[in-house]
Image (cartoon, rainbow, N blue to C red):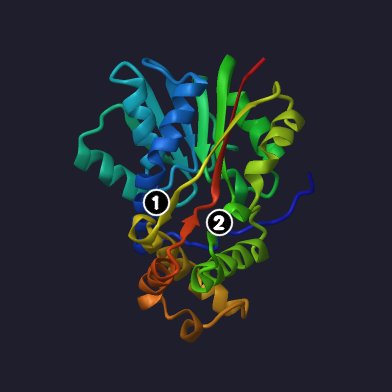
Amino acid sequence: MATRQSSYALGHSEHELERLSRQAEVFAPFTRQLFEQAGISSGMRILDVGCGAGDVAFLAAELVGPNGEVVGADHSAAAVEWAVARAQEQRISNVKFLEGDPVVLKFEQQFDAVVGRLVLMYYPDPVDAIRKLARHVRRGGLIIFQEFDMENARSFPTAPTFDRAVGWMKQTLSATNTRVQLGLELYPVFLAAGLPAPKLRIDALIGGGSEFPCEILAAAIQSLLPMMEKLKIATSAEVEVSTLAKRMRDEVMTGKGVVLSPALIGAWSRKG
């Protein structure tokens, strides 16, 4: 897999960190099922890669219980500060957060598992990242990642505003070298990193009318808007972000249709 430079086009503003937490709420059942199916259990020591606002770390902390430990790491100081404040507010004592990229960080003790959600898609070389992250995992330990296949996001019958917003997001992320279909690449990525063939699962949100959280897509577009304008993909006047969620929902309801989120594809393997 070719190496390419990538950048996190969504940024780390307070708006974006809040959006990540709202997104985490709707994806939490899928990630919980993935972790439980893969074998995350009480007493384990977990490394959460690219912890962001801390939601995956908090979920892992719940699963490993008071006798377990979760370490979340992120290169963004703003994200780490946000996650630490949330942990203190929620009185979660079995999780801690570090600033830095866990691909290059050193740890005194190995982990029972390394996990990540929507993070490898931003690495210039996911194979190299997994290979280096696996060094932090004990023999027989778990490597678990959950990534998007953004081609799954669509409406039926066609809701033009929703599909246009999805197109803006895919185009902007792709232009900043984000792998928008990395979920489908996880199997060969694990193999290329020297791991045993991973097991896979796929999940997605689907809903009609008011059931689908259009606000999350609209909030992502808002975070991406500065980059979208810089790349001349769309202007703020075209996007009209303040009414975007309502317009998407109204179109879906008028058409009595449904919309689908990007697919969340989970892969897990044990270190040989």
Q: Position of residue 22 (x, y in %)?
A: 34, 52
**Residue tagged 1:** 23
* Mark 1 and mark 2 residues within 8 Å of each other at the beta carbon: no
Neighbour tally class for label 2: few under 14, some 14-19, many 20 plus, Cα within 10 Å? many
Horizontal side of 167 relative to 220 (left or right) equals: right
Q: Quadrant of residue 19?
A: bottom left
Which part of the image, by quadrant, shows the C terminus? top right
| Above or below: residue 207 compared with residue 46 | below
Horizontal side of 73 relative to 186 (left or right) equals: left
Q: Position of residue 169 (x, y in %)?
A: 56, 65
| Above or below: residue 1 compared with residue 210 | above
Q: For the point 41% across and 76% down, which residue is it?
A: 241
Q: Position of residue 86 (x, y in %)?
A: 27, 44
Horizontal side of 169 relative to 236 (left or right) equals: right
User: Which marked residue is nearer to the observer: mark 1 or mark 2?
Assistant: 2
Q: Which mark is on residue 185?
A: none
- 252 and 144: which is toward the camera: 252
Q: For the point 35% across and 72% down, which residue is it?
A: 246
Question: Of helix, strand and loop, which one carries label 2?
Answer: loop
Name the amino acid, label 2.
Ala
- 84 and 253: which is toward the camera: 253
Q: For the point 66% across and 62% down, which residue is it?
A: 174
Which part of the image, by quadrant, shows the N terminus? top right
- 86 and 144: which is toward the camera: 144
**Residue tagged 2:** 153
Number of residue marks: 2
Neighbour tally class for label 1: few under 14, some 14-19, many 20 plus, Cα within 10 Å? some
